[in-house]
Image (cartoon, rainbow, N blue to C red):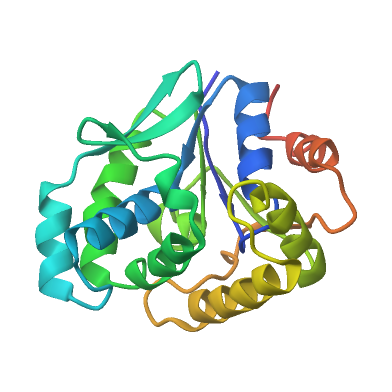
Amino acid sequence: MKQLLITIDGPAGAGKTTVSRMLADRLGYRYIDTGALYRGVAYEAKVAGISVDDDPGLETLCRTLTLKFVRNEKGTRLVSGESDITDNIRAPDITMRSSAVSARPMVRTCLLDVQREMAREGGVVFEGRDMGTVVFPDADLKFFLNASIDIRSRRRHTEQRSSVGQTLAEVEKDMRRRDEKDSSRTVAPLKPAEDAIIIDSTELSVEAVVERMLSYGTVTK
């Protein structure tokens, strides 16, 4: 049976991560969180004191970075060089930095090759914002997952409150700012691919979303 390349795009808080992981588990596929790669670059840029608009600095940084996903007893972890940076990349400032960094052409070019190499053998679910439009325009199946801003901010607040401490209002404000940045940028803006299957998860459970994805003929359990 053919190993498919599946992309799931959408804004923050739509449920992409949980859905992508569950879909990959159901299919026995690998799961790739591409947003974590951009967060990794943003985090390492902060550590190195490189501004998000310092294109030469970011290009030099990207040439020296080695980012990879490793599975261990804690799950799938993002490793930079020899350091596990998974927990470091979820801070609110890294979230905003990653949105800015992801709009820099040299960063996208660098990570494009990384992502395409990961997809070479198929059997993978890629989660991101431009997977179906830019990175994998010929993907076997493309989904765009969305939800209302109220639901998305509540989900993100619940997810972060034990470690970040933002109020719900602060989370929603940050999310609106990121939505605006991601949707209006000239390089790979956030939008559904023309042939993407759009799913609104506002009133759907994670299980219901995954079942809907599995209902499409080319996705086989």
The structure residue drawn at horizontal position 66% and vertical position 73%, both measured from the top left corner, is 170
Please tell me in which quadrant of the rendered image residue 60 appears: bottom left
Q: Give the x, y percent position of residue 140.
A: 53, 42
Residue 25 lies left or right of residue 106; in this view the side is right
Please tell me in which quadrant of the rendered image residue 6 appears: top right
Residue 178 lies left or right of residue 63; in this view the side is right
Residue 65 lies left or right of residue 42; in this view the side is left
Q: Give the x, y percent position of residue 124.
A: 49, 32
Assign the C terminus to one quadrant of the image.
top right
Residue 216 lies left or right of residue 90; in this view the side is right
Assign the N terminus to one quadrant of the image.
top right
Q: Give the x, y percent position of residue 65.
A: 17, 46
Residue 131 vertical position relative to residue 214 in the rendered view, above or below: below
Q: Who is closer to the viewer here, 102 or 89?
A: 89
Residue 80 vertical position relative to residue 175 in the rendered view, above or below: above
The structure residue drawn at horizontal position 40% and vertical position 63%, both measured from the top left corner, is 98
Q: Give the tally of numbered discs.
A: 0
The structure residue drawn at horizontal position 42% and vertical position 61%, both measured from the top left corner, is 94
The structure residue drawn at horizontal position 62% and vertical position 71%, both measured from the top left corner, is 175
Q: Who is closer to the viewer here, 120 or 23?
A: 23
Q: Give the x, y percent position of residue 33.
A: 48, 43
Q: Who is closer to the viewer here, 30 or 36?
A: 36
